[in-house]
Amino acid sequence: MMRKLLSTTILLILAAPAAAQTADRLYLMDCGHNSAKDQSLWSPGVNVGKPIEQSNMCALIKHGAQWLLWDTGYQDAVADRPVDTPVGHATRARKLAAQLAELDLKPSDITFVALSHTHADHVGNVELFPTSTVLIQKAEVEWAFAEGKAAPFKKDHPMRLLEGDLDVFGDGSVILVSTPGHTPGHQSLLVHLGKFGWVVLTGDAAHFKDNWDNDRVPRINTSAEQTHASRARLAKVVADKQASLWINHDLPTFESLKHSPQFYD
Ligand SMILES: [Zn+2]
């Protein structure tokens, strides 16, 4: 009997996959709010003239002694002075700097600033982190810094230019997933946490749940074909990993989650 138990245990150990690596913590940050008058900007011909309230998420991930910030939201100045943009009225209830300070972090503590893409509602605070390495797709930089366009942030900012996916810490816990379509070098983020499990942060691969569910492509997207393909790719990741799906501008999702200084681990 004892012998049988022992051999069963050994077999179980051998059959178990290597322990999956995980990030330590994920803090979801409030990076702004957009009040839009016309939802059809994101769904041509559908919900025309219907207003929509949108969140703007950033996420801070702790991995050992290193920190990765996912997107930077609207510029902190929007907290003092809300702005009207081509897609709505932008406000910021809390500054990003204040949310970091609340965790006793300085911008220089942030090792990596990973950007989903270069639209203003995502890169507003990149220059708050002059020493952090920006992780961005090469295709995005070539597109956003093209001659004649207003640069989204300083071109000489420390940057690592990616061509496809990146396993940021080399242990499978934090992965940038190439999801072009909204812009030429758009990317999403996949994070593995010990207790919470896997989570996909879409960036703007889809803007809100209705667009994800119905696979609607915003007018502004640079490629509808890539948008559909990128969403199919993310849907497969979500299914394979049984991952939570956090759609950046989906306010009901944001409101259902814990916000920094609370965290997921
Ligand atoms: Zn956005």
Image (cartoon, grey):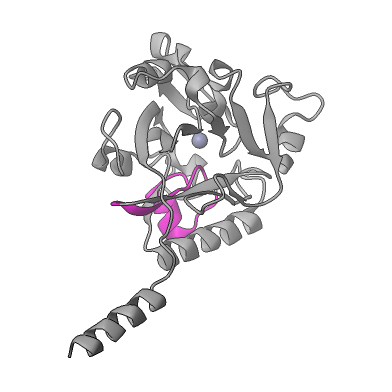
Residue in the image at 35% along x and 18% along y: 104
Query: Looking at the picture, how far across and down is residue 68, in whole percent?
Result: 49, 34
Q: In this view, does 30 lie above or below 189?
A: above
In the rendered structure, does residue 2 fall within the stretch colored magenta? Answer: no
Query: Which percent across, then down, holds residue 134?
Result: 62, 31
Nearer-the-camera pick, 66 or 217: 66
Q: Is residue 6 left or right of residue 25?
A: left
- In the rendered structure, the answer to whether residue 92 lies left or right of residue 232 reads left
Q: Residue 11's image quarter?
A: bottom left
Span shown in magenta: 195-217
Is 205 included in the stretch rendered in magenta?
Answer: yes
- Above/below status of 96 relative to 248: above
**Front in this rendered view, residue 14 or 188:** 14
Residue depicted at 56% across the width and 39% down the height: 116
Q: Residue furthest right?
A: 147
Task: Work out which quarter of the rendered image holds the N terminus and state it.
Answer: bottom left
